[in-house]
Image (cartoon, rainbow, N blue to C red):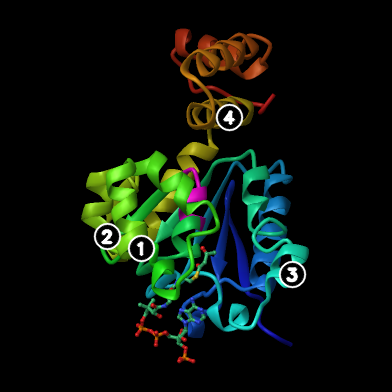
Amino acid sequence: MTEPLVQVDRHGRVGMITLNRPKQLNALNDALMDQLGAALLALDGDPEVGAIVITGSTKAFAAGADIDAMVDWSYMDVYQGGFITRNWETIRQVRKPVLAAVAGYAMGGGCELALACDIIVAAESAKFALPEIKLAMLPGAGGTQRLPRAIGKAKAMDMCLSARMLDASEADRYGLVSRVVPDAELLACTLALATQIASYSQPALAAIKESVNRAWESSLSEGILFERRELHARFASEDAHEGMKSFLAKRAPVFKHR
Ligand code: CAA
């Protein structure tokens, strides 16, 4: 029996996916990305799951696309095989909040995978880089697009063109990560955060995720319009009425995720 390349565990309403190619620093090959995509879709479709965490090892979240696998690929191989498009973008279909818990290296595609998550919690050991230029390549899983949106053009150009590596405190200062925590507390802190998020109403979380993502992908007026529609739609939700009633009654809400 071969070891699965991703391990899936449940912690209450949180689904945790651990990338599991430790010897290769979780280099992201096709098989791993297939398994990651399948795990993400299964957890997204599970009504008992409210939030998803992706993590790696203590040494590496992921050191990027698998260079060993790519070295002899031709243009036709990647074009016809839909490299990246075929199985790396599954994460974009996920409607539930996805948190990355990053310790050690998040490089190349590993950094891009973290950037595709909704929240990044970084351990103090976390290191972020897009070093593809050293291979005469480019960040091809959203890095040239998501990084400037996250940290601005100046810092993003520096990272992409020079392969500059950011430590956790720089990544925090530049807005690449949401929180930095001691290494020993990474999983517990991320799990606590994910558990808190998962306790809220699922449709409201999905509406917020969609609305914040609109801020990246549309004009301000389109984004505001989308947000307003999402707000109005909350009034069709049982949970929103329950949330407001429970506040007024000074009791805990009981959400049905409807
Ligand atoms: N692909 C394949 N194998 C990798 C890998 C990768 N991206 N990163 C690390 N490994 C392998 C190494 O080859 C090594 O294997 P062996 O033990 O068989 O020699 C093993 O993992 C351990 O790595 P190192 O010995 O290099 O560990 P280190 O601690 O000295 O260095 C590191 C760590 C700085 C992360 C270094 O491994 C490194 O620079 N890795 C490559 C990072 C990179 O260039 N990523 C971008 C890939 S391209 C990409 O991602 C394209 C895209 O946008 C989709």
Q: Picture coordinates of residue 65 (x, y %)?
A: 54, 70
Asked if residue 258 is among those painted magenta in the image, a careful observer would answer no
- Foreground mark, 4 or 3? 3
Instruction: Indicate which disc residue 166 carries.
Output: 2
Q: Earlier in the sequence, mark 1 or mark 3?
A: 3
If you read the primary sequence from the N terminus, does the residue marked by circle 1 or circle 4 appear first? 1
**Ligand 1 located in image quadrant:** bottom left
- In which quadrant is the N terminus drawn? bottom right
Q: Which residues are magenta?
A: 113-118
Report if the CB atoms under discs 2 and 4 are less than 8 Å apart.
no
Query: Which residue, given by chain and number where applicable, does mark 4 sit on?
Result: 210
Q: CA distance from mark 2 to mark 4?
A: 28 Å
Q: Indicate whether 32 appears above or below 218.
A: below
**Label 2 residue SS:** strand
Does residue 84 sit above or below 149 in this rendering? Answer: below
The reply to whether callout 1 and callout 4 are in contact (CB within 8 Å) is no
| Residue in view at x 26 percent, y 48 percent | 172
Given the image, on which type of amino acid does mark 2 rest?
Answer: Leu
The numbered dot on residue 76 is: 3
Label whose residue precedes the other's in the sequence (2 or 3): 3
Which label sits in the foreground, 2 or 3? 3
Question: Quarter-wise, where is residue 225 in the image?
Answer: top right
Query: What residue does disc 1 label?
Result: 129
| Circle 4 SS class | helix
> Real-space Cα distance between discs 2 and 1?
6 Å
| Residue 115 covered by magenta stretch | yes
Amino acid beneath label 3: Met
Query: Few, some or many C-alpha atoms within 10 Å of disc 3 (few <14, some 14-19, many ≥20)?
Result: few
Q: Whole-Å distance between the Cαs marked 1 and 4?
A: 27 Å
Question: In what quadrant of the picture does the C terminus appear?
Answer: top right
Which residue is more in the foreground, 56 or 218?
218
